[in-house]
Amino acid sequence: MIKIGIRPIIDRREGSQDVRGSLEVQTMNMAKSAKTLIESKVKDRFGNPVECVVADGTIGGVAEAAACREKFDREGVCGTLSVTPCWCYGSETMDMDKTIPKAIWGFNGTERPGAVYLAAVLAAHTQKGIPAFSIYGREVKEATDRSIPSDVEEKILRFARSATALGEMKGKAYLSVGNVSMGIAGSIVNPDLFEKYLGMRCEYKDMSEIIRRVDQGIYDHEEFERAYAWVRKNCTEGEDVYNGAAEKSRADKDKDWEYSVKMALIMRDIMDGNDKLKEMGWNEEGNGNNAIAAGFQGQRQWTDFMPNGDFMEAILCSSFDWNGIRHPYVVATENDCLNGVSMLFGHLLTNSASIFSDVRTFWSPESVKRVTGKELSGYAANGIIHLINSGASSLDGSGQQEIGGKPAMKPFWDISPEEAQRCLDATDWVPGNLGYFRGGGFSSKFKTKGGMPITMCRLNMVDGLGPILQIAEGYTCDVDDEIYRIIDKRTDPGWPTTWFAPILTGEGAFTDVYSVMANWGANHGASVYGHVGADLITLASMLRIPVNMHNVPKERIFRPSAWNAFGTNDLEGADFRACGNYGPIYR
């Protein structure tokens, strides 16, 4: 269970005036209010409420701070929130643990100088090299007011969501099945990134492990029969748009379906383990690899003679399968671990499924008009980016789920069976292009509904600098059917399409849609539902990963207060300088 620690900080002076005694109730009420807020609004990826662990009593000095630290160590908290309405002794009460993120909420009231303590203890954090997030309400409140102002609530929840994501990654593994795909640098799996920045480890399996498990029957045979029957009922096989006279026979296609389903079962088992395998006598295989994310090399050493991994990736990344509605997995196409991490960031912050895409083509209004004779409109009016990939685009990405009557991608616990079925019905499974996928297989094909707010991000590695993150908030777009038909036919007519229009600021990388495409740092991107760029920025600052490109409004950016010491005008430059100064959190 994911846990966040809450530290109620107090002025420890007792004596005849009993300052401490006069503040005990107010201070503990702040802690209780924060606990109620977080536990009611923040969940882990399995839908469990995040638990808040409150110190056994208020913290007025070093001894009580140490006792709190011991309790939090036992409980395994992944972040701490200190709360106070008053002046306290900063360097004596502060959280000194450098390995977990921390925030401080100083109550904005006039009776006691909570703002003075907040400023003093933040200065101590900065001086000692222990960055902390500052939370201070804009409006003055009454001392008896137990409500949490909306601006304070926003920051507490942003901190809690990001700390929860950090806590869920820590101690888990990235599972690399295969190696480098087609020379894609993102599939060079570097353990330094995972160990130093994410608190994860890397596990490596050869793709032949899948062949071994198929050949030796190391999978749940009853589940396979059930899964295969479900797939043939719910996964519509589309027209073979690629192969013409070279099209595979019906018997060979059926064999590809069988193998594709077995690949999905086996990849899940390699990630999670499976007690059924232990019952079958395969104890080692049943243990799994404690993987929170994975990647599959596929091309070319696999796909030149085996069915592609597209079905495996797409169904695992979706929020449902033959076992019903369940949490989505993160399985990156072509073992692009950097895009896998990007998918993971978005998934952990939203609890919804991720879309893995090629950032394929920028279509200007002029190019669309020339090629199709039609004009773009709505969100697409300034041009669109064609997001398309044969692999790990979750079926949730079809946009068949709804929030308030509008297309959405939801946490699995909010998805109805009818919504899951609509995603399946909106998807065809096209026989693989035998020029690319000589071993056959099936790729999902759907058209994402327009009007969804989404955020696309990408982690990149820069020599001499380390990891950097790119973020683009925007909307999915509907286009005229004729525009879609013509562009789809000339691109890859057997793959899922998402038309993406980033929100433009008129500056830098977001001057226009072309600039977004031109400044994107790799051939892949990961998209999740909602405008969550601010959460991604907060998480990145916790991990000491600078953000080199984003269109998040300045007022939504929430980083540790120490970042101000590196510059308050050029916030992007300050972020780079701060992350470089502090270095990765797990170094």
Image: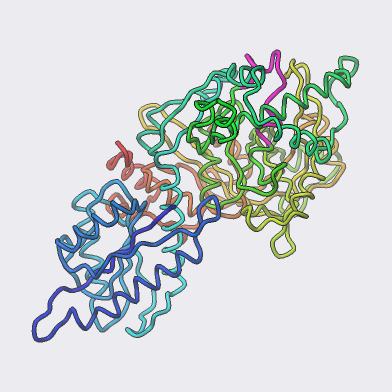
The way the protein has been coloured in the rendering is: rainbow
* Main SS category, magenta section: loop
Q: Is residue 432 magenta?
A: no
- Residue at the image position 83 percent from the left and 18 percent from the top: 252
Q: Position of residue 550 (x, y in %)?
A: 51, 47
Whether residue 247 appears in this view of the structure is yes
| Residue 383 appearing in the image | no
| Residue 9, quarter of the rendered image | bottom left
Image position, residue 127 (x, y; %):
19, 53
Depth check, front residue: 174 or 539: 174
Q: Is residue 237 left or right of residue 132?
A: right
For image coordinates 66% across by 46% down, the residue present is 319
Range covered by the magenta-colored residues: 298-314
Q: Is residue 288 left or right of residue 87?
A: right
Residue extending farthest to the left is: 15
Q: Quadrant of residue 10?
A: bottom left
Q: In this figure, what is the number of numbered marks?
A: 0
In the image, residue 158 lies at what x, y percent?
45, 59
Note whether 512 is above or below 26 in the view shown.
above
Residue at the limit of the structure toward the right, as seen here: 245
Q: Nearer the viewer, residue 424 or 480?
A: 424
Rendered-image quadrant of the C terminus: top left
226 relative to 396, above or below = above
Residue 156 x %, y % = 41, 63
> Is 307 part of what is drawn in magenta?
yes
Q: Is residue 511 left or right of residue 441?
A: left
Judge from the rendering whether residue 432 lies leftward or rightward of residue 335; answer left or right: right
